[in-house]
Image (spheres, grey):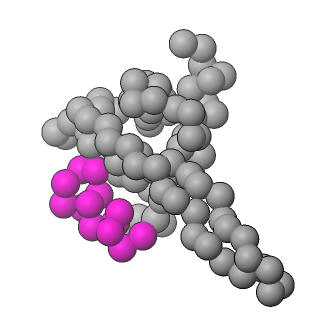
Amino acid sequence: MNKERLMKILIAPHVSEKSTLLAETARQYVFRVTSNANKKEIKRAVEMMFDVKVDDVRTINVRGKSKLFQGRPGSRPFWKKAYVTLSEGHEIEMMGAQ
């Protein structure tokens, strides 16, 4: 697995009330990832980028919402979300975290 591929797997952290609560209580962090990434690639990417030990990765394919765009029906794109559980004693410092 090359480093260039691993650098492109994680798109952005997914910040919400639920993801913030999971980070504080269960050592779980939520990321938006490329739709063709598998769990092993996500684990390696997180370990490489943040220098932490990953215990578990769970993924979800999120369906895009149906919306009206200028009166015409359309939909937002589908995307993939990954819940990453870190080992005891490891933590990811997010920007703006207290």
In the rendering, at what x and y percent does residue 96 appear? 48, 66
**What residue sits 60% from the left and 30% below the top?**
7
Query: Which residue is nearer to you in this view: 28 or 69?
Result: 69
Q: Which contiguous range is marked in magenta?
A: 16-28
In the rendering, at what x and y percent does residue 80 appear? 50, 48
Examine the rendered structure and indicate whether residue 50 appears above or below residue 30: above
**What residue sits 61% from the left and 73% below the top?**
66
Query: Which residue is nearer to you in this view: 50 or 40?
Result: 40
Q: Is residue 18 magenta?
A: yes
Q: Is residue 6 visible?
A: yes
Which image quadrant for residue 3? top right
Query: In this image, 46 relative to 5: left or right?
Result: left
Locate the N terminus by quadrant.
top right
Examine the rendered structure and indicate whether residue 68 appears above or below residue 43: below
Examine the rendered structure and indicate whether residue 80 appears above or below residue 75: above
Q: Residue furthest top?
A: 1
Q: Is residue 87 magenta?
A: no
In the rendering, at what x and y percent does residue 43 appear? 39, 30
Q: Residue furthest front?
A: 73
